[in-house]
Amino acid sequence: MSQLERLLAPYVEAVEAEMRRWVPPAEGPHRMLYGMVRYHLGWADEHFRPCAATRGKRVRSALCLMAGEAVGGDVACVVPAAAAVELLHEFSLIHDDIEDGDRERRGRPTLWALWGLPQAINAGDALFALAFLALNGLLERGVPPARAAETQRRFARTVIRLCEGQHLDLDFERRDDIAPEDYLLMVEGKTAALIALAAELGGLVAGATADLVEALARFGRALGLAFQMQDDLLGLWGDPERTGKPAGNDLRRRKKSLPVLLARRISDQAAEALDALFKADPIPDEMVTRTLQLMERVGARREAEARVRESYRAAMQALDELEAALPAERIAPLRHLTEELMGREY
Amino acid sequence: MSQLERLLAPYVEAVEAEMRRWVPPAEGPHRMLYGMVRYHLGWADEHFRPCAATRGKRVRSALCLMAGEAVGGDVACVVPAAAAVELLHEFSLIHDDIEDGDRERRGRPTLWALWGLPQAINAGDALFALAFLALNGLLERGVPPARAAETQRRFARTVIRLCEGQHLDLDFERRDDIAPEDYLLMVEGKTAALIALAAELGGLVAGATADLVEALARFGRALGLAFQMQDDLLGLWGDPERTGKPAGNDLRRRKKSLPVLLARRISDQAAEALDALFKADPIPDEMVTRTLQLMERVGARREAEARVRESYRAAMQALDELEAALPAERIAPLRHLTEELMGREY
């Protein structure tokens, strides 16, 4: 068990149990629909038999519960929101896999690869609706209806942000005029908005003041941005031993990630080298190595690292603000989570 | 303007205005996303310029408002629920068109045919979320939060019913052992659940008693079933002048609609003829005519008509119950809508 898993473990069980409350069993006339949903969640194999497949780490729901604890709330009340955030995340993965044409996730075939596009799109929609239903479970836990309604409003708004981000991401694939600012707008929607929501709802449901809820949202957003930008760096210069992928993997996949967009802007020479690489098919290993070196030489790596650091600091600063109002030991789990997700080098 | 359109006209404007409140303009970085949504809703052309394309009739939202009026509620409060129901219906059409491979709707290319699967799936998701956001607008109109939350719960539950129905519909395409009962279960989810929701939410939001809300839901469900079964009959024996489609159109499309399933069950001879027809490619006109006659002779048409009549009467009986508790003139629009949708022959 990694350090991160150890940190998440106390939260995962409550969230999994709550998620299971809302997903009907894979039996009766709708066996296939809920079997597919259960397969995607890592609860069932492709014959819909219970199994222990690799699941998501449930980082977002743990973050939601940690935020609720941080503001001194009753965590039992926050659990439905945490489960809803996780179900929403899982829904978005089903549709992302279709939209990106990915045939594998967590070491298994994706839903659409096994059951075809129409059923997979529909299973995603069902999981989307289950997330809203799970959120409605807040009322059973005694959360005041007005607060539950505000939670639902922010939840729906965030789904719209996710769709906006995904729309940009899909559009970027066919464009070659993307500025680093466009890219950050995409990441804010596609990645940061949901992490911000997780932190924000934890505080909101637990009854925190508007200032604290806002600081939690700011923390989540900065963490989400930092995490995605770091992921982009690892996709190019990550240690293959640790990432499990060859160096320069994202270049081979022609991914227009942040360092690529920065290199293009900084240097015409780098822009030309990247154009040539994106056009080459296949892309020679030597070309990947040479382009990576050039990107590093023109300062694209350094610039991307500076931006990660900036977002990381913004996240930590938001935690400092929370700590000024709340006991330090209640903020500690959020700090540890941030350190584990980002490494300790920042 | 048809009689039906005249009946709906007083409701359409308020619903359209409310729907427009929630869909962002097609400009800025998300121009394409909201342009696609606006195109689908019939508000924009394929270049995202405002236009007056053929729109949905907005039957479901009108039904919702009529139900709110019937129980004596303030219709202004019901408008967000009506708009949400209509947005939800429109979302489901975007994904249905993808799942069924339909390239045309309301005389125009479908979203996926113009912008590809990935963007179309994502635009559908955005519209889904906008429906939930529109529903949250109930709070602005002074609907008590507990009631708004119950509305949201029923809304989410209904989306799940829709997905269950769509899952069966997709599954039936590859199966040849479908009983009429399976088919009705599918229609209850795919068609009747949303019409029931429209009627039910109108009453619920307007503050009706549980009995009246239940009668409205029962009315909507029966109307939805009757309407779909009648649509199946029209798809086989409808007057080509009125349906705009050749006689036996659903047989040509190999649709396993209710009369087909009934014919199969009633008569081995009809089952064999239908098997042969579904296997033929192309299907000769003469074969369509002969099979239609056989289906009629073995009593499949009569049986399907009896079922339509039964559901129609159940719908009218639910209206009678409402009329026992409420002034007849407030129930009249629901009666007229039912008659216009179903024709007056029942």
Image (cartoon, coloured by chain):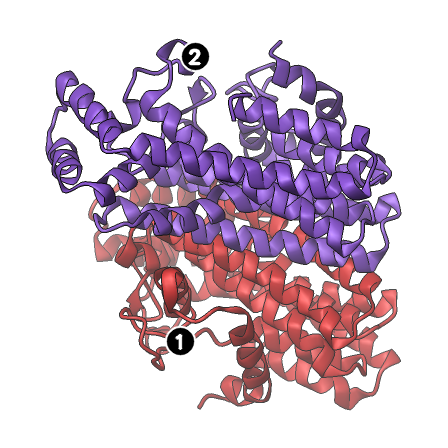
Chain colours: A red, B purple
The three-letter code of the residue at mark 2 reads Arg
Secondary-structure class at tag 2? helix
What residue would you read off at disc 1?
A43
- Which residue occupies 39% across, 73% down? A42
Position above or below: B106 against A95: above
Dot 1 and dot 2 within a common chain: no
Seen from the viewer's position, the closer of residues A39 and A261 is: A39
- Answer whether residue A303 is visible to the viewer in this image: no
Q: Residue sitting at 34 percent across and 80 percent down? A: A51
Q: Residue A231 in the image: state x and y as whole percent.
A: 48, 65
Q: Nearer the viewer, mark 1 or mark 2?
A: 2
Q: Residue at x 42, y 51 (%)?
A: B185
State which quadrant residue B12 falls in: top right
> Considering the numbered disc 1 on the image, is that residue within a helix, a strand or a loop?
loop
Q: Is residue B223 left or right of residue A73?
A: left
Residue picked out by circle 2: B242
* Closest to the observer, A52 or B211: B211
Q: Is residue A88 visible?
A: yes
- Determine the CA span between mark 1 and mark 2: 51 Å
Residue A269 in which image quadrant? top left
Q: Which label was assigned to residue A221? A: none
Q: Is residue B192 left or right of residue B142?
A: left
Q: Is residue A210 above or below residue B228?
A: below
Could you say which is closer to the camera, residue A225 or residue A251?
Answer: A225
- Alpha-carbon neighbours of circle 1 within 10 Å: few (<14), some, or many (≥20)? some
In screen coordinates, is B191 left or right of B38? left
Q: Amino acid at mark 1?
A: Trp
Could you say where residue B83 lies in the image, as x and y percent from the top left?
A: 69, 36
Instruction: Check if mark 1's residue and mark 2's residue have beta carbons within 8 Å.
Output: no
Chain of the residue under label 1: A
User: Which quadrant does the N terminus of chain B fall into?
Assistant: top right
